[in-house]
Amino acid sequence: MITEKAYAKINLGLDIVGRRDDGYHLVRMLMQSIDLYDVISMEPTEEQGIILDDSSDIPMTENLIYKAARLMYDIYGVRIGSGLRISYEKHIPMAAGMAGGSSDAAAVLRGMNRLFNLNLSNERIAELGVMIGADVPYCIYGGTALSEGIGEVLTQLPDLPETVILVAKPPIQVSTPEAYRDYDSLKAVPHPDIDEQVDAIYEYMTGISSVDRSQSDKAAACISRIAASQGNVLEFVTEPKHYQITELKQCMTDSGALGAMMSGSGPTVFGIFTAMDKAEIAAERIRAAFGEEYFVKVTKTIGQTK
């Protein structure tokens, strides 16, 4: 048996820059992995086919874990041969805007590559991933990345300085396809400065600065620039429908977050904090104000998946 960690992501910036003739939206997103993950376990079995230990209500054919395994079987089935049993521990909330399903699928692709000695490169695995979903290629690598096209064109960036992140998901569901459709009806929205965020990361890594500062000062300046430039155009369609998103953002900023924003199409909100203790205090305030039905987690950013 082998196991893979499937890390959640947040969008430090999410912009829509166009739409293809087939209806898919063109995006520019700054993607970031956080230390919150599902655990996927895989082992060969004498039984034929894919056996998924699954207690969710998702139909098998719609489960991205099953889709990823099925894809590998269909393309490399002769080399794989026998059956496969997959089980998983779910820690990333479902339908949260944190790519939990896409990350699970990426973990299955990586894991089957290892388990059956397919010797596929990450580039090839990412090519397979886009057949499952636009976020899957990013989830193959993780870390900090600029995502363009429909999400499959990736530019891996230097790792962000380790940053404290508070995530909170209200007990509501948001339809991603509906959010993108609703966006098309908007007249005009402010767009985030993705280029400024990318520049902040590169300048932090190369040490470009007008004054000589310590490494910690440079890290703080980088995170401050990213927080000041963050934005998510899908907030303009999701937030008016769900007051909980506005309340969570306000609670986080009132508690000292440098910035608070919705991730993906929502409804998860994340806050960027300068210290773990500040984030923990904010988390307790959210739990006290909104109740146990809210998923609340203090975590941190992590680098590229190795």
Image (spheres, helix red, strand yellow):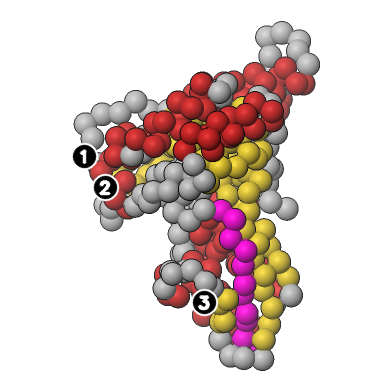
Task: Using the image as rendered, state which of residue 100 and residue 105 is in the foreground.
Answer: 100
204 left or right of 196?
right
Residue 164, compared with residue 115, is above or below; it is above
Q: Are marks 1 and 2 in contact (CB under 8 Å)?
A: yes
* Nearer the observer, 5 or 171: 171
Decide whether residue 101 is among the magenta residues: no
Judging by the rendered image, the residue that carries numbered circle 1 is 185
Residue 212: mark in rendering: none
Q: Is residue 88 magenta?
A: yes
Mark 2, secondary structure of its residue: helix
The residue that disc 3 covers is 70
Q: What whole-number distance in Å separates the C-alpha atoms at marks 3 and 1?
A: 37 Å
Q: Is residue 113 visible?
A: no
Mark 1 surroundings within 10 Å by alpha-carbon count, few (fewer than 14), some (14 through 19), many (20 or more): few
Of the two numbered discs 3 and 1 on the same chain, state the one appearing first in sequence. Answer: 3
Query: Residue 254: x percent and y percent?
Result: 51, 21
| Residue at the (39%, 31%) spot, across then down | 246
Image location of residue 32, percent across then percent down: 58, 41
**x%, y% of residue 50?**
56, 82
Q: Is residue 97 left or right of residue 137?
A: left
Name the amino acid, label 3: Arg
Q: Amino acid at mark 2?
A: Arg
Q: Position of residue 76 (x, y in %)?
A: 58, 79
Q: Which residue is mark 2?
A: 181
Position of 294 with respect to 243 (left or right) is right
Within the image, what quadrant is residue 238 found in?
Answer: top left
